């Protein structure tokens, strides 16, 4: 029983990381209708920057915070310089462009930092705490706490501030918001900046659990896609719940289903995406897509 | 392009392709054999992306499936080489069909997501079933040798064999895209609702073209085994799928001839790029995808058309500047 609860909590922790990246995907999808395939690689790049700062002697907490700030700026720049040109274009073009960014960032990271892998220090202590007779790692609890904090901040931003209101308006109806004085372009830049921030957070949280290399986020991106598809691509709550479901089922399957083991865990999100597409294409919390002929 | 120039171009290309193995040494000929292999896969992907507007980021997975099918049939079941090619094609057709049924009923984005997942998962799957695939060790396959009665070296024979099969696949694609399937596919791409009111079964057409495109990747995979004589999971990473996508964008979406140009690109760019830095290939692929979407969405095959249009506009603006301005205005309105 203790083992089961440990696996469960660990799953929620991993799921929280997926949820952070899924939230980034949802943020961008809601405001621009783009599924950003480069989200994972942007996060990987940020994580390498954090690693570089840490190697240069900056304490890991400060390095992570600095990186998250830099990622915010980088996200804004990417939207303004690259994505703006293609916004409102065909799906195919947008997929190819964000995928191009994916490959480009992957190559650049390989060029700068090489293709070897390296350890990444955890933001949390390696201790365990005893909760109700079950030993749980501080790291797992810390990750869940960070995610809940971030979700709370996002909620406050979108529901309680002027900027958040403007961002929601710009996403809902760009033309009408522009007419009432919302600077739609700025809101889109802000959205990409926030998404890059969330991605960087996911990267810094996941890197200690895996090894840091240029393909760090490849699988994580698929898990985040699955989380977003399960929750509904336009739902923030969906992304969080989806991330947890994916994290827990991945961990359970990896531990208790012999055939899957550690190697084939990646099949879990794929299977979930398939089932969601067949049974409920809009996801658990998403809005159904309706097209006018 | 008139029928006559086209015939001349195709004829010239055929002659050039036929003399290649007699002009270069074995190493170069081997590279050109790979160009043919990639051309078949790229053509298949272009049928899907260019003609039907669906996107697959995982054609490397079907390429791998075809390669492993051929390798296992030849090595473990002693199937003749030429039978392994259609077998790989048929198996990938079936796999593509099964895969496409759920994924294609929906938005094009989901297909991209699921196929990306497939491409990431496949090397793991190959390693997991190591009883069959020999895992990371890989499988060595004896390459086809030139029969005694032909005055050819092995590498020349291999090249010409791939050339014949590639030519057949190109001919087949060209015919298909002029026929009923091709018209239905283009109708779906240009407008799903109008196409469906004209009696096109959207899901059936999309699934069929996805399966055909997977079959092309499978045939290319089988040819890859002929050309390399070895398969291992490391050869079928995500990079392969990305290379195919870069090739269709460079060669030009929805063009048959662009596949050849794209294949040349993905065979020779990594060779020279890796002299500078192993990571350069990725940087070039990524940069090229973005740059082409930015300035030349029609790919290299669209360059002559683009240049002609530019020249025509310049001529016109020299003669009568007013109409040119007007033309540009109406064009802008058309876009908005």
Image (cartoon, helix red, strand yellow):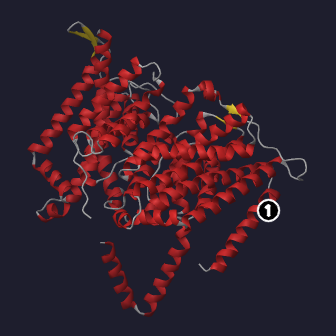
Q: How many marks?
A: 1
In the rendered view, tell whether residue A180 sits above or below residue B322: above
Could you tell me which residue is drawn at 74 percent across and 62 percent down?
B17
Quadrant where the C terminus of chain A is found in the figure: bottom left
Quadrant where the N terminus of chain A is found in the figure: top left
Q: Can residue B88 be seen from the camera position used here?
A: yes
To which quarter of the image does residue A275 belong?
Answer: top left
- Nearest the eye: B67 or B319: B67
Could you tell me which residue is drawn at 49 percent across and 84 percent down?
B312
The local crowd at label 1, few if under 14, some if 14 to 19, many if 20 or more residues have their Cα within 10 Å, is few
Q: Can residue A16 be seen from the camera position used here?
A: no
- Nearest the eye: B263 or B279: B263
Could you tell me which residue is drawn at 53 percent across and 75 percent down?
B305
To which quarter of the image does residue B257 belong?
Answer: bottom right
- Nearest the eye: A9 or B324: A9
Residue furthest top as drawn:
A133
The residue labelled by disc 1 is: B19
Q: Where is residue B169 shown, x and y percent of the image?
A: 64, 57
Task: Look at the numbered disc 1 and give the secondary structure of its residue.
Answer: helix
Q: Where is residue A65 shown, x and y percent of the image?
A: 27, 34
- Nearest the eye: B34 or A293: A293
In the rendered view, tell whether residue B274 sits above or below residue A205: below
In the rendered view, tell whether residue B326 sits above or below residue B104: below
Q: Where is residue A6 shown, x and y percent of the image?
A: 30, 15
């Amino acid at each position: 029983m203790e083992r089961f609860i440990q696996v469960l909590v660990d799953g929620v922790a991993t799921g929280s990381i997926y949820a952070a990246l899924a939230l980034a995907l949802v943020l961008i999808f809601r405001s621009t209708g783009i599924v950003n395939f480069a989200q994972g690689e942007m996060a990987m790049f940020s994580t390498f920057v954090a690693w570089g700062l840490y190697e240069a002697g900056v304490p890991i907490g400060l390095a992570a915070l600095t990186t998250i700030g830099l990622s915010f700026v980088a996200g804004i720049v990417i939207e303004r310089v690259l994505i703006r040109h293609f916004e409102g274009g065909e799906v195919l073009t947008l997929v190819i462009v964000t995928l191009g960014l994916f490959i480009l960032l992957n190559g650049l990271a390989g060029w700068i930092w090489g293709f070897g892998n390296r350890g990444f220090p955890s933001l949390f202590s390696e201790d365990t705490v005893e909760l109700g007779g079950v030993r749980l790692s501080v790291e797992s609890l810390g990750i869940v706490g960070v995610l809940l904090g971030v979700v709370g901040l996002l909620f406050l931003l979108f529901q309680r501030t002027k900027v958040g209101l403007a961002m929601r308006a710009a996403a809902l109806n760009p033309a009408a918001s522009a007419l009432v004085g919302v600077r739609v372009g700025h809101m889109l830049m802000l959205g990409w900046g926030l998404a890059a921030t969330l991605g960087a957070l996911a990267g810094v949280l996941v890197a200690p659990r895996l090894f840091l290399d240029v393909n760090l986020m490849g699988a994580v991106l698929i898990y985040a896609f699955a989380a977003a598809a399960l929750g509904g691509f336009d739902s923030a709550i969906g992304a969080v719940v989806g991330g947890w479901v994916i994290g827990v089922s991945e961990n359970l399957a990896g531990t208790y289903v012999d055939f899957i083991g550690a190697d084939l865990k990646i099949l879990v999100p794929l299977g979930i995406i398939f089932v969601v597409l067949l049974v409920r294409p809009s996801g658990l919390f998403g809005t159904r897509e309706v097209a006018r002929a | 392009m008139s029928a006559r120039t086209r015939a001349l171009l195709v004829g010239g290309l055929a002659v050039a392709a036929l003399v290649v193995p007699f002009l270069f040494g074995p190493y170069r000929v081997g590279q050109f054999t790979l160009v043919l292999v990639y051309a078949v896969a790229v053509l298949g992907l272009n049928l899907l992306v260019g003609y039907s507007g669906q996107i697959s980021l995982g054609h490397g997975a079907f390429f791998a499936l075809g390669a492993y099918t051929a390798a296992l049939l030849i090595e473990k079941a002693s199937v003749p080489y030429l039978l392994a090619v259609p077998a790989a094609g048929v198996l990938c057709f079936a796999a593509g069909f099964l895969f496409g049924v759920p994924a294609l009923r929906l938005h094009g984005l989901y297909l991209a997501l699921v196929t990306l997942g497939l491409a990431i998962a496949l090397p793991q799957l190959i390693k997991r079933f190591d009883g069959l695939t020999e895992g990371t060790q890989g499988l060595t396959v004896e390459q086809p040798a030139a029969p005694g009665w032909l005055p050819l070296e092995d590498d020349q024979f291999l090249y010409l064999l791939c050339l014949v099969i590639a030519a057949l696949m190109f001919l087949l694609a060209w015919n298909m895209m002029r026929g009923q399937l091709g018209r239905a596919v283009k109708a779906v791409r240009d407008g799903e609702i109008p196409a469906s009111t004209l009696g096109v079964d959207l899901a059936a057409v999309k699934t069929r073209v996805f399966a055909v495109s997977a079959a092309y990747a499978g045939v290319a995979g089988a040819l890859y085994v002929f050309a390399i004589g070895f398969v291992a999971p490391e050869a079928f990473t995500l990079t392969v799928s990305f290379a195919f996508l870069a090739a269709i964008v460079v060669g030009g979406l929805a063009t048959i001839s662009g596949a050849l140009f794209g294949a040349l690109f993905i065979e020779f760019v990594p060779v020279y790029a890796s002299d500078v830095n192993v990571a350069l290939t990725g940087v070039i692929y990524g940069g090229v995808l973005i740059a082409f979407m930015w300035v030349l969405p029609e790919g290299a095959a669209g360059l002559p058309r683009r240049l002609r249009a530019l020249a025509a506009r310049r001529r016109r603006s020299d003669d009568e500047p007013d109409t040119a301005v007007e033309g540009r205005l109406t064009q802008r309105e058309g876009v908005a």
